[in-house]
Amino acid sequence: MIMDEAAEALAKAEFFDICDDQQRGMLAFAGDLRRFAPDEVLYKSGDVPQGAFVLISGTLKSLPDGGGKPSAISTPGSVVSAMALILSKPRPVTVSAVTECDTLFVPRSAFLKLVQQSPDLAQRAVARIERDLGNYLGALEPIRRRMKGE
């Protein structure tokens, strides 16, 4: 039952569409289902997450360093901190539960082991990161233009 729930969560998670069914099954096996109470923190700004969280149910919020506007995360299958699957770097946001939340934690070590075993998965991961980074930089372009007075 638990494995089925974990595998289903990964099947809904957009980032993990780079994995085939067998790879998602391996990550589900290595993953950890975690429940967070309202106001409980998944990780704080400055922490180095050891993997990514896949939202199964509930609502999370992400609060950037130095305040700023929090973002709500409530879509089942949302992946929180996908970059933590690859990079061991401090995160610039605090992520906490707004409501009771069920998540699947996918450890970086399990993901990297799969990537090492599958060059095709490694290539798909690189392509996904390039696409996501391009989208992020494209979203920042209007801000850059305003700052330059264009």
Image (cartoon, rainbow, N blue to C red):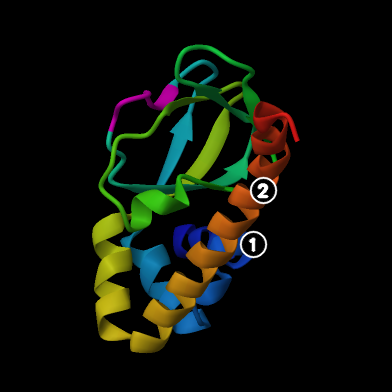
Per the rendered image, the range of residues in magenta is: 41-47
Q: Residue at x 37, y 34 (%)?
A: 91
Local secondary structure at mark 2: loop
Q: Quadrant of the C terminus?
A: top right
Q: Residue at x 45, y 27 (%)?
A: 93
Q: Residue at x 33, y 66 (%)?
A: 111
Q: Residue furthest top?
A: 67
The reply, left or right, for residue 130 in relation to residue 11 is left
Give the answer, above or below, for where 7 lies relative to 21: above
Q: Name the foreground residue: 127 vs 79.
A: 127
Q: Which mark is residue 77?
A: none
The reply, left or right, for residue 75 in relation to residue 21 is right
Q: Name the foreground residue: 52 vs 129.
A: 129
Q: Could you tell me if residue 32 is visible in this image?
A: no
Q: Which residue is mark 1?
A: 12
Q: Which residue is mark 2?
A: 76
Q: Quadrant of residue 122?
A: bottom left
Give the answer, above or below, for where 72 lies relative to 55: above
Contact check, label 2 and label 1, Cβ < 8 Å: yes
